[in-house]
Image: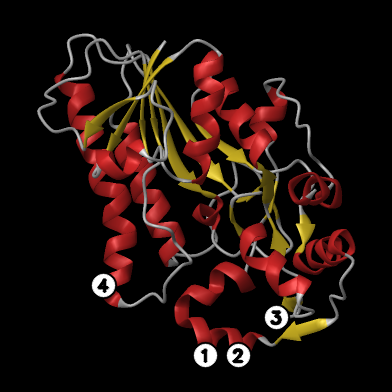
Amino acid sequence: MKILITGGTGLIGRHLIPRLLASGHQVTVSTRDPEIARGRIDNRVMLWRAFEGQSHLNGIDAVINLAGEPIVDKRWTTKQKQRLCHSRWDITQQLVALFQASTQPPAILISGSAIGYYGDSGDKVVTEATPPVDDSLPHRLCARWEQLALEAQSQHTRVCLLRTGIVLAPDGGMVTKLAPLFRFGFGAALGDGRQYLPWIHIDDMVSGLLWLLNHHSEGPFNLVSSHPVRHQQFINALGHVLNRPAFLRVPAIVMRMLMGESAILLLGGQQALPERLIADGFAFRWCNPEEALRDLLR
């Protein structure tokens, strides 16, 4: 297949591209800065400068849309909220316009979303059929993102929506941020620790993407482990793997003072299940968080 990827230099893209190349696919990455991207991506990958000069997607078999500003790296000022939304919405609109302008559009669009679509669901079990419980920024961002992506759907193109959980990887994301704190004895649970943490090992994340690429599926999919755990359980597992204590706690009020509105991402959660992937026959390799963390931190 000839596959176009946006967000190819991000955490998921960096792990996905080698698997695609190893399977014999031809990969093109759309990026705002090809010079920087070239230093991060296999030289067998073609680079486009943010769709510059592109008027259609004829000749492309599949598109994987992973682009977006990191959502927890900065405090949610009004300007940052706009950046979070438009870094996702605008590029998805551009892609859809190219799909619609194509005489032979790609057969599939796999487009990013997040488990935050459902809002803070407490102890409620969440599947792809579960309606959102609030109108928070994460829900509004994801709902619009998905709505835009679905405009590419036609008799020629199927659309899959990735409601992704917290991706655990050895070279970025939550594990990279928490591990140094634990090693220095500052491992801590956030809030009361009872909120669910919808996690997924990067290997299962990439395998899930490849599954959707190669099976005739469409619609939303929860890209999360089949065994969700509470935040405290996850913190205990990380402390055990690193042989460090994990008895400290950061009160919710302190988190809100430090992070403002974005604290909801860490103090809230979803007991989300990948019901549709499992029903389609996908088998998760990593279901125990301690085993997953041991693999990533070995």
Mark 1 Cα within 10 Å, few/some/many (few <14, many 20+)? few
In the rendered structure, which amino acid carries the disc numbered 2?
Val
Secondary structure beneath dot 4 equals helix
Secondary structure beneath dot 1 equals helix
Report the residue marked by disc 4.
79
The answer to whether the residue labelled 1 contacts the one labelled 3, judged by CB atoms less than 8 Å apart, is: no
Residue 275 falls in which quadrant of the image? top right
* Alpha carbon separation for disc pair 4 and 3: 27 Å
In the rendered structure, which amino acid carries the disc numbered 1?
Met
Residue sitting at x 28%, y 62%: 83
Q: Out of 214 and 146, give the one closest to the viewer.
A: 214
Q: Which mark is residue 257?
A: 1
The answer to whether the residue labelled 2 contacts the one labelled 1, judged by CB atoms less than 8 Å apart, is: yes
The answer to whether residue 99 is seen in the rendering is yes
Left or right: where 44 falls relative to 148:
right
In the rendered structure, which amino acid carries the disc numbered 4?
Lys
Colouring scheme, one of rainbow, by chain, secondary structure, one colour = secondary structure
Q: Disc 2 or 3, which lies upstream in sequence? A: 3
Report the residue marked by disc 2.
254
Residue sitting at x 85%, y 46%: 291
Q: Which mark is residue 170?
A: none
Q: Position of residue 32 (x, y in %)?
A: 23, 44
Q: Which mark is residue 191?
A: 3
Q: Position of residue 123 (x, y in %)?
A: 74, 62
Mark 3 Cα within 10 Å, few/some/many (few <14, many 20+)? many
Q: Position of residue 242 (x, y in %)?
A: 84, 63
Q: Is residue 242 above or below residue 156?
A: below
* Alpha carbon separation for disc pair 2 and 3: 9 Å
The answer to whether the residue labelled 2 contacts the one labelled 4, judged by CB atoms less than 8 Å apart, is: no
Residue sitting at x 78%, y 38%: 286
Secondary structure beneath dot 3 equals loop
